[in-house]
Amino acid sequence: MPLSAVASGLEAAPATATSATQALIASLGRPAPARTAFAEARFMHLLERPLVVSGELAWLGGNRLQRRVEHPDAETATIADGEVTVQRAGRPARRFSLQRAPQLQALLDSFAALLSGDAARLDRAFRIRRHGDAAHWTLVLVPHDAGVAGSVARIEIDGRGKRSRCMRMQEADGDLAVDLLGPLAARMPARPTREALLALCQDGP
Amino acid sequence: MSGRGRLLLLAGWLLVLAGLGLLVAQRLKVGTDLRSFMPAPATADQRLLMEQVGDGPGSRLLLLTIAARCAPRQHRATPGLFPATPCAPLPADRRDAALAGLSRGLVAALRHDRRYSQALNGSFDLAALDSALLPYRYLLSPTLDTQPLDEAYLADQLQQRLDDLSSPAAGLLKGLLPRDPTLEVLKLAERWAPPAAPEMRDGVWFSKRHEALLLVQTVAPGFDPDAQRQAIGGIRRAFHALPGSALAQLQFSGPGYFSVAAAAQTRHQADWIGRISSLGFIALLLLAYRSLGSLLLSALPIASAALAGIATLTLAFPQVHGITLAFGFTLLGVVQEYPIRVLSHRRAGEDALRSVRALWPSLLTAIASACIAYLAFYASGVNGLKQLAVFTIVGLLAAGLSTRYLLPRLLPARVHDVAELRWLALARDLVDRLPRPRWLPALVALAIVLMLILAPGPFWQNDLAALTPVPAPLLQRDARLREALGAPDVRYLLILQAPTAQGVLALSEQLQPRVDALVAGHAVDALELPSRYLPSAARQLARQRKLPGQAVLQRELQTALQGLPFRPGLFQPFLDDVRAARSLPPLTPQRYARTPLGQRLAAMLVQRDGHWLGLATVSGVHDVAALQALGAGSGGTVRLLDLKAASESLVAVYRTRILEALLAASVLLVLTITVALRSLRRTWHVLAPMTLATFLVLAVERMAGIEISLFHLVALILAGGLGLHYALFFERDTGDPAEQRRTLHATLVCVLSALLVFGMLGWASIPVLRAIGLTVSLGVAFHFCLSILMAPHAKPDHARQD
């Protein structure tokens, strides 16, 4: 092993997550573009019942992420070059800076890092805790950046083995977004509740 | 005079100079605002220009770029300087994020600084609209003009908001939704964004060359270099205080920056040229007179001239303009001749006082006539020129009188008489043998007329920009940034006039559809009217009347919300705001002025002479005629102000004043010289070569394609003053060959020293300095040659004659 690699490993050790967590994150990596089906339930204090959408999330490599919604209405959101573009059929595209959408920054940081298996990147953006074992695990990510932490309290990712199956974004104002990923996306209940989804993510088959 | 007496006199003189110096140091206030140097405006457009030059929104705008320098290196050969070789740049995404961070940091720092009325970088900030003014959004936004707040509209809007909440934009809108479900605030933000906003990256403006772009409006006027230097310095300091600023480079553009850069560059070049030519001048005088003591003493009349001139100015005027001092010191170049004449005319064994007495009539004629010439400047009525006249006249008198009455008493007794120099005798011989053809004046006059007729291009240079030159690369960069930022053109301004501020706003609203048509037709890229930031009170009241009452709105909202998952009571803040908006007094410019956007409006809405003016800024003009047509039929209440044309007409007025003054001066000069010499023939010998040489310089410069500016005129006047000396002294026939040799010596030293000082200036790259240098050098050469060739031959018993 080259000396520099040893040195950087030693330097990095105290600040980073444990080597088991690093190995877990590395094992999640897939080559770009990586796509996965998703179904999202958003529980908001503005609304009496959750909003449910489904479609496909794609990591296009680097800092580019695409969120394509197919149900109930088609909508494509793209994050690239620090800018977010939201496109809906029959409407002019809406563009805004990633800077103004900390939730999306957190989504990008976590999602891109997980799909590229980049433990170092994840570590730069979040304080990482891991529960469970290699078969049933949960990663809890708390943003380092105060601006992001002001709107995203934490992100929890549940997985089995080398697959993530759930992503829960807990916002600072109490709102919650639960994304079922991959095959689990098909099992989004018609009238989801927080409890039902949590059970599905952590204990479901 | 005894040794002790001399010492006392010298001490006294130095003491007076020190006193004057102290007075100047304490009282001198140098103004840099160009307006105080220009003539009083005569037309409405000129008056507006003088105000606009300092106060207009366009001239106070600074365009800023923040560009990545490069990644830090381990070896820094020259810290603080730009790296000479390109070094490894940061990766694109990290670079843009870093630059965007600096851009945001700089805006945050400047926003609370009283020296800047606006700092924009593209990031929209809801704080721009004061939260207490938020209910006004229904009166400011055009929504209600076409769309009532009814059930159908609300239902459509609420469905859209629901879609928004499931999109990634949810986080942005969540906080706004209960108060503003129709997003009026965002509509206003879009309305107030610059018409042609540059590319956005990481939430801020970026150019195509990967620079973050910012617009800063200073409170200080654009053409006051001192105030602008402070404003720019403040921005630099704020920037360097930001973490990570070492990796980026902040650059400026815009009128204010140009005035600072041009002043600094001109001063820098004038300084180093001045240092070199001063050394040459000292070497020349040492060579000519071989006496360090004489050299040092002969500096005293020049110092007296400068100090007495400035001291008088500080007593007579509250503030002295920088250009007055620059022009004044140029014109005082004439006084260096006085001590030179004295030194050259000294005879071996003769008291210096006696040499001066012999010389004095000619010198006095020169001084008196020069003073009379500058009196004409005083009569011009232009403040800057008045100061110039006072400065120069006092300077000439101080130098002349001290040369006559003080200097000779101090000069060392032992001298070497230049009349005994062999080369000088040969030179005088040569000069005497030169033919003096009688037809020469006619030939020169004919040549002048022909050259003036045949000369290419326009005669006068009226462009103010030529007075404050900006290097071409800076201008190109400015054009590029101006286009990228959609920043207003500094040349055109649409003026709306009405008796009241509300009248201007109403006029502005009337014009809006026609302006929209012009923009759609690509006659102009953008035209920003004042009503864009504040509708008239009448329009606000009309919108207010369209707001539904509380009960009606509640019912419509209730129906619109059916089947939608919004929490009950969520939109109470919306209902409250609409109720508040229904009873608000219309927003006035005065009330609005306390907000950041109101300051922007304040720059576009000004009160002048009992009426109100709206200044609408224009960017990217493609069809001037179409813009001018906006004013047709308005009875003068709407007109396009061409600042360039107005400023050129102002320069033309200014020049006319100078030319009139010069004409008067010429008449006075002829009278003075005739009276002094008591002979028309002698007057002709003095004034004919001087006049011909002056016009010859003009003709040659015109033939070379040079357009004549104010600076050329001032330089011609100086050269004329020098030429007067040459002609006066050559014409002076003492009948003594030794004295004639001394005259030639003095004139040669004067010509060489003038050529040295002004010839150096002629090589400068800055047009102002070049204009002065070239004109004076040519003038000195022509005056010298013509005054020799047109002087009468020396008396027959002293020189060969046919």
Image (cartoon, coloured by chain):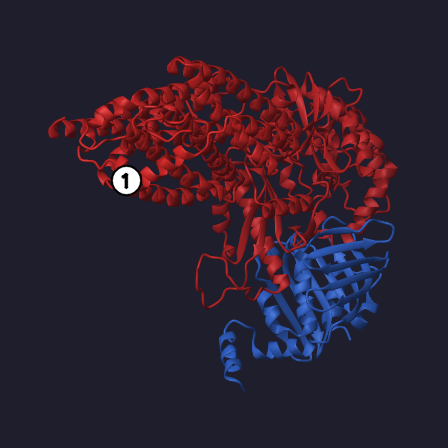
Chain colours: A blue, B red
Tell me residue A16's x, y (percent).
55, 72
Q: Chain of mark 1?
A: B
Say if B59 sits above or below A46 in the image. Answer: above
Residue B452 on image: x %, y %:
62, 30
| Residue type of the residue flagged with mark 1 | Leu
Assign the C terminus of chain B to one quadrant of the image. Answer: top left
Horizontal side of residue B262 vs B676, given as left or right:
right
Residue that lies at the very extreme toward the front in this rendered image: B802
**Residue furthest toward the bottom?**
A1
Question: Is residue B123 visible to the viewer in this orientation of the structure?
Answer: no
Q: Nearer the viewer, residue B419 or B175?
A: B419
**Left or right position of B79 against B20:** right
The answer to whether residue A86 is visible is: yes
Residue tagged 1: B421
Q: Residue at x 60, y 79 (%)?
A: A20
> Is B791 in front, or is B150?
B791
Residue B259 higher or lower than B602, as above or below: below
Mark 1 burial class by Cα count in 10 Å: few <14, some 14-19, many 20+: few
Q: Secondary structure at mark 1?
A: loop
Residue B290 percent location from the top left of the image: 25, 42
Q: Residue at x 66, y 47 (%)?
A: B480
Which quadrant holds the N terminus of chain B?
top left
Foreground residue, B288 or B306? B288
Q: Is residue B560 above or below residue B682?
A: below
Q: Quadrant of residue B50?
A: top right
Q: How many marks?
A: 1
From the viewer's perspective, is B592 left or right of B714?
right
